[in-house]
Amino acid sequence: MLAAAVYAVRRLFLRPKCACGGSGACGSAAVSLRTLAKGQKAVIAAITAEGEMGRRIRDMGLVPGVEVQVVGRAPLRDPVALRLLGFTLTLRNREADFITVRTC
């Protein structure tokens, strides 16, 4: 229940940084977070994970409308380090596959 409340508050106060409002009208394609290169920024468009994994991803602050930047990758490209909302977060590629982003 707390996760749902946090998610609702974040959706109210976090707006997409893209000029198109995150709708994709600017011509940006929706891609998996896993495909972003180091230094690339994007706005989260959707979280496709369900159940426990979906809840965990949202609890970490990864909700639609949040801007993320890839700050690094491990030598074997897993995990990936992201910068969002003033903190750094690392995700496994199998978790990043459930996050769709728009690179505007």
Image (cartoon, grey):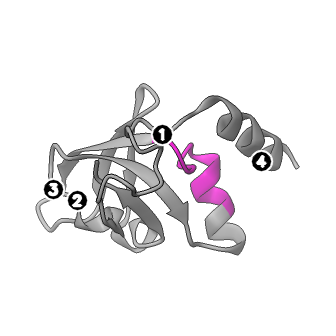
Q: Which residues are magenta?
A: 55-66
Q: Amino acid at mark 3?
A: Ala
For marks 1 and 2, give the CA distance: 18 Å
For marks 1 and 3, give the CA distance: 20 Å
What is the number of the mark on residue 36? 2
Question: Horizontal placement of 84 versus 38: left or right?
Answer: right
90 part of magenta stretch: no
The image shows residue 66 at horizontal and vertical percentages of 48, 41
For marks 2 and 3, give the CA distance: 4 Å
User: Camera-side residue: 18 or 47?
Assistant: 18
- Upstream in the sequence, badge 1 or badge 3? 1
Q: Residue at x 63, y 58 (%)?
A: 56
Q: In the rendered image, which quarter is residue 57 located in?
A: bottom right
- Upstream in the sequence, badge 1 or badge 2? 1
**Foreground tag (1 vs 3):** 1
The image shows residue 60 at horizontal and vertical percentages of 57, 46
For marks 2 and 4, give the CA distance: 27 Å
Dot 4, how many residues are within 10 Å of its Cα: few (below 14), some (14-19), or many (20+)? few
Residue assigned mark 3: 37
Q: Residue at x 36, y 56 (%)?
A: 102
What is the number of the mark on residue 16? 1
